[in-house]
Amino acid sequence: MDSDGTQDARGTHADRVPRPAGPPQVPPRPAQAPGMPPAPDGSTFLTWLRTPRPEAAPGVWRFGHLPRPDEEPERIPARQLIGGALIAFLVGWLIWSLLWNGYLGGWWLLPLYAMIPDSWAEPHSFGSVVVVYAYYVAIAMGIMIGVGRLGRWSEVWHRYGLPAWRRAAPVSERPPAPEEDPAQWNQLRAAGAADAAERLGAEARAGRMRDVDQARIARAWQGVRSGRHSLATFSGAVLQDGAAACLHPSGERDLPGRLAKHDLVTGQVRLGTTADDPRNPYSYRGTGLALGPDLLGTSLLAVGPAGSGKTGGVVWPLAESLCLHALAGRAAVVVVGAAGAGLGPVDAYDVVVRVGNPDSVYDLDLYGGTTDPDEAAAVLAEALVGDLADPHPGADSRRSTTVLAQLLGPFRGVHGRFPSVPELRQLLDGAPGPLGALRKALTEGGKESLLRELDARERQLGHPGDVGSVLADRVALLDRPAFAGFFDTSGQSRPFSLRALDHPVRVRIDLPERGHADASRMLARLVLAQFAASVAVREDRSLFACLVLDDATGVITPEAVRGIQRLRSANAGVVMTLRTLDDVPRPLRSPLLGAIGCRMALSGLTPWDGQDFAEVWGKEWTEARDVTDRQIIAETPAGKAVHMLRRVITGNAPTARAVTVRQVERERWSASELAHGVPPGHAVLSLTSVRGEHAPPLLVDLRS
C-alpha cells in the first residue's frame, strides 16, 4: 500500500508469478568474443595445398596451371567456320532430297535389293521393313559424315557446343586419394612418425596451419631425412607445438602483410602474366610468370628507367618471397636500397641497418666479420676502389689489397681488432703519430713479420703511383659526422656481419643515398663483396642465400662480375636493378649479361641498351612467308554468283594466292622493338634455371 492508500501493482504482479526452484540458470559461454569472425575450418588451406602443380617450363606459375600445346593450332575464323558448316548441311540435305525423290535414279537401292530375299518382298514382313529403314539410315549417316567432315562440324561442336560450356564452367576438384593427399603427410607415416602426421593433419583441418607452417615443417623434415636432425626430436616438437613447431628464431609465422601472390609449395612468386603476343611461344601465352630460387640461383638483372616498375613490380615481390622463405627456414636474404625506397615494412625483417641514422639499432661490420687481415683487405679494397680498377675483365685490385693488408695485419696484431674508420684514414694518410705508435708496439712485442709489413708500407709512402692516398680519400667519405656512430670496431655497438647467412635471417640495409651518394655506392660494393665472400665458405649450402640490390649503380666491377659467376655453385644469387646499362663500364657489359642467368628489359629502354640485350639474346631461325594475292575477275554471270557466295562465306574477295616460304635468321628482339615496342608496365624477360633449362625472351605484363 502506497502512502496515498493505493496498492503497488508491480508488487501485486510479482506476488502472483511463481519463483523457480533451485539456483538461477546461467546462459552458456559463447564460443568466441562478440564481434569476432568465426574460426576458420581449414578448407581454404586444404584447397590450396591440394591444388595441382604440374611440371612446367621455367617461369610458368605452376599453381593450378593447365598445360598448353607447344604449337598454336590452326584456328578458322568464326564466320568462315559457321558459314562452311551451314553450306555443308544444305549440300547434304540437297543430296538426300535428290536421292529420296528419285531424281538421281534408283542405283543407290541396288545393294538393298541384293540383300533382301524375294520371299520378303510380298507381302511386306517386319524383317524387310527393318532392313529397308536401316539401309536408309546408313545412307543418310554416310552423307552426314561426309558433309560433316567437309564442313568441320566437329570443330563447331568443340568451339560452341557442350565442351565449350564445360571448359567455361568451374571444375569441382575431387579430393585426392589418401595415399596421394599432401594433407596426410604420408612421408612421415612411412618413416614411423604416424602420430606427428595425425597431429599435422588435425591442425590443417582445424584451420590452424598456414602455408608458411607447411613449408617450414617440410623443410625441417628434409633436415631429418638428410641426418641433420633426429626423428625423435622432430616428432616431439610436432606433437608438442603442432603447426607452430620448428619456428623461425624470430617467432614469426607470417609477414605483417603481402602484396604479391606466393606459392610456398613450389617456392614461386607471381610477377605478372605472359602477354598473348605472337612473339611469345604459344605454350607461354596467357600463363602466369613466376620466379623462385631455382631461377634466382642464376641471378637476375632488371634494367629500366625510373618509374618503369623495377622496385614495386620486381624488387619488392622478390624480397617479400625471400622473406617468406626465410620464415620457412629455406633462405637467407639481404635487401639493400636507399632509405624510403619502398622495400617493405620494418616488421618484415629481423635486422634493419640504417646507415647514417642515429636511431639504428644495428651497425654494419666494415670487415665482414672475418679475423683474417688478408681477406678483410681484399673485401675492403673492392669496396673502396673497385670502381677505379681497370674495367677489363682480367683486371683486379691487388695493389690496393696489398696496401690495406700491410696496415690491417700489424694493427690487429697489436690491438686485437681492426682499425676504425678514423684510425684507418690516419694510417693510410701516413700520419707519423699513429704509424710511430704502431711501430713501437710491434717492436716491443717482437712481431718481426708484422713489422716488415709496416716497413714496406712506409717505404711506399709518397712514391709516385702509391694508391694509399686514393684509399685515404675514399675512406674519408665514411669519416663524416653522419657516420660517427657507425662502423665501430671496439665492440660497443651491435654490428651485423654477413657471416650470419648460415642462418635463415632477413636483413635490410638502408643506405644514405641523399647527400652521401658516393658513400652509398661504396657501401653497396662492400655488401656485395662481403656477400660473395661469405656464401662461398658456408658449411650448409642447402640454405638459399640471396642479395637484393635495389640500385646497382656504381657496383659492377671486374671482381663483382667474377663473384656473381661463382654464386650459382654456392646456392646463392643476386637481384640487381639498373636505370641504364651506361652505369656499367662498356668492357663489363657483355661479361655481366653473360654471368647473369635471368635478364629483364623494362619499358622505356634506350636503343643502345636494347642493342646489348639483343646481342645477348641472339638470333633464331624463323619461317618467313611472302604472300602475293591477285584478285580473280569473273567474266560470266555464274562466275560472278559463285564469287559473291564466296565473299559472303569468307568475308574476302576471291583471290589467287601465291605463297613463298623461306627460312631466315632474325633477332629474337631487336633494339628498336625493345626501345619502342614494349608497352608501359611490361618487360621482356629471359630465364635460365640452375639446372640449365632456358626460357626465350618473353613479353610479360607486370601489372596483372
Image (tube, rainbow, N blue to C red):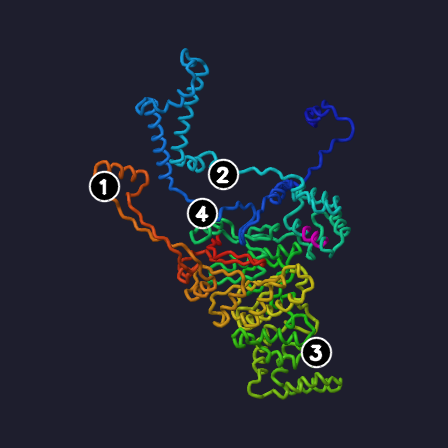
Of mark 2 and mark 4, the one earlier in the sequence is 4
Q: Which residue occupies the foreground of this view, 575 or 85?
A: 85
Q: Name the residue rendered at 50%, 58% in the picture.
A: 686
Residue 167 image label: 2
Q: Considering only vertical position in the picture, is 634 above or below 674?
A: above
Q: Which amino acid, mark 1?
A: Ala
Q: Residues within 10 Å of mark 3 (few under 14, many from 20)?
A: some
Looking at numbered disc 4 in the image, what kind of residue is underneath it?
Glu
Quadrant in which residue 526 is drawn? bottom right
Q: CA distance from mark 3 to mark 4?
A: 67 Å
Badge 4 is on which residue? 72
Where residue 663 sits, quadrant-wise, is: bottom left
**282 on left or right of 444:** left
Q: Quadrant of the N terminus?
A: top right
Q: CA distance from mark 2 to mark 3?
A: 72 Å
State the residue position of label 3: 412
Q: Earlier in the sequence, mark 1 or mark 2?
A: 2
Is 197 one of the magenta-colored residues?
no
| Depth order, front residue of 657/363 | 657
Say whether residue 667 is visible.
yes
Our reading of the magenta stretch's main secondary structure is helix
Q: Which residue is mark 1?
A: 634
